[in-house]
Image (cartoon, helix red, strand yellow):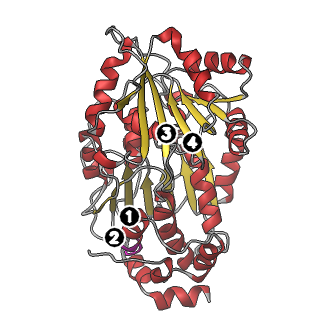
Amino acid sequence: MDIQLKTFAELNLLPPLERALKEQNYKIPTPIQAKTIPPALEGKDILGCAQTGTGKTAAFALPILDFLGGDMRKARSGRPQALVLAPTRELAIQIGDSMRVYGKHLKLRTALVFGGVNQNKQVREMQRGAHILVATPGRLLDLMQQGHIQLDELEVFVLDEADRMLDMGFLPDIKRVISKLPSDRQSLFFSATMPPKIVELASQLLSSPFRVDVTPKKTSVKKIKQKIVYCERSEKVGLLHKLLRGEDVGRVIVFTRTKRGANTLAKKTEKAGVPVAVIHGNKSQAARQKALKAFRAKKVRVLVATDVAARGIDIDNVTHVVNYDLPNEPESYVHRIGRTGRAGAEGIAVSFCSGEELDYLDDIEKLIGIKIERDPNSVKPAWKPKPKQGGGQRRGGGSTSRRKGNQKGKRSKSSLGNSRSSKRGPKRGKRNTKENRRSVVA
């Protein structure tokens, strides 16, 4: 399919959607939107390779809203018609907000389901009925097991940030969710990288998908100025505080490998006279949202975070990302530094590298295909064994009740709900008939 989409007006979306886009001053689609939305509107399965910050949310949100808004069906209690599965509560909240903004003139309800908070409000929203459900895997399965959510009437399924899902240990939960989906559905699958496990999962989930790739791995970080500063571990705090005093340093996200490390670094930075917000998996939902709100509002200019914040948090004008600790998974490096240099702007990523992190640096450079610039004033330390891995952010977006006892073994394609005879049956024809849709919303 040769797509030459230049403007949103060419999509011929429902009038309420077009009105919302105009209010948001959306005129020209991003590459991921231009390539994804037309085939998605036709009901095709999508396999998309794209990072956050590329406009991916609108790429799947607009087709969902266009389809459900055209049918104008009532929301049934506990039975959503569209499900978006996200790895973290922050990303789920962001997606939910986007759904409401784009669909503000449509009579569609969106519900959010994620762990880390009391479930009662989420249960009430599902009982009331929601057309669209945005959820993290752990809490979704909790509410499904309790009988509050059933997926037998689902027509559109979106799996967002699939590789991050796997990094956080969600693969068994994802398979359990997919096994409950109707076989006659549309599926949209997005991942920033495509390792073998992701490719295998996509083959089980999708049927003759339309492929979209807008983030070639070798060039995804080209607009970000990267630098490695060699140092001893004990020198990192001083180097960070010196960097923060720089005249060109504005809004900064500092990544640590562990939650304890984030707390310790934040306290030391506060003592140095720099206001700091902290976000990691042990923080309550209220505390995490408060920290992000303060950072967005520029009440604090430094956010210390673990990898729970590496994706799904869209904050403009982040001038610097600092890898206080290099990540032990090279893909996380790309997602971390992607918090700067967004929306076409340039950004700066500074990474401190001690002797025990030299192996991590080698892995990162192999992944991104370039040798990162070294600070000429720093001296390469002696190699040391890698530090023990701990304090990671496994399953940061879901309920804690499912952290143990992951299912073993593989399911066949049929158990994952992939045996289809057609795409949504007769409803697909109704969706493709613009006259039918216009008459409903006129």
Residue 149, numbered circle:
none
Alpha carbon distance from label 3 to label 1 = 39 Å
The disc labelled 2 sits on which kind of residue?
A: Lys
In depth, the one of 372 and 331 nearer the eye is 372
The disc labelled 3 sits on which kind of residue?
A: Ile
The disc labelled 1 sits on which kind of residue?
A: Gln
Name the residue that disc number 2 marks: 423
**Residue 263 rendering spot, x and y as whole percentages:** 63, 19
Of labels 3 and 1, the one closer to you: 3
Q: Quadrant of residue 261?
A: top right
The disc labelled 4 sits on which kind of residue?
A: Thr
**Residue 400 rendering spot, x and y as whole percentages:** 55, 28
Residue range corresponding to the magenta coloring: 38-42
Q: Are marks 4 and 3 in contact (CB under 8 Å)?
A: yes
Name the residue that disc number 3 marks: 348
Query: Which image quadrant: the C terminus?
Result: bottom right
In depth, the one of 260 and 203 nearer the eye is 260
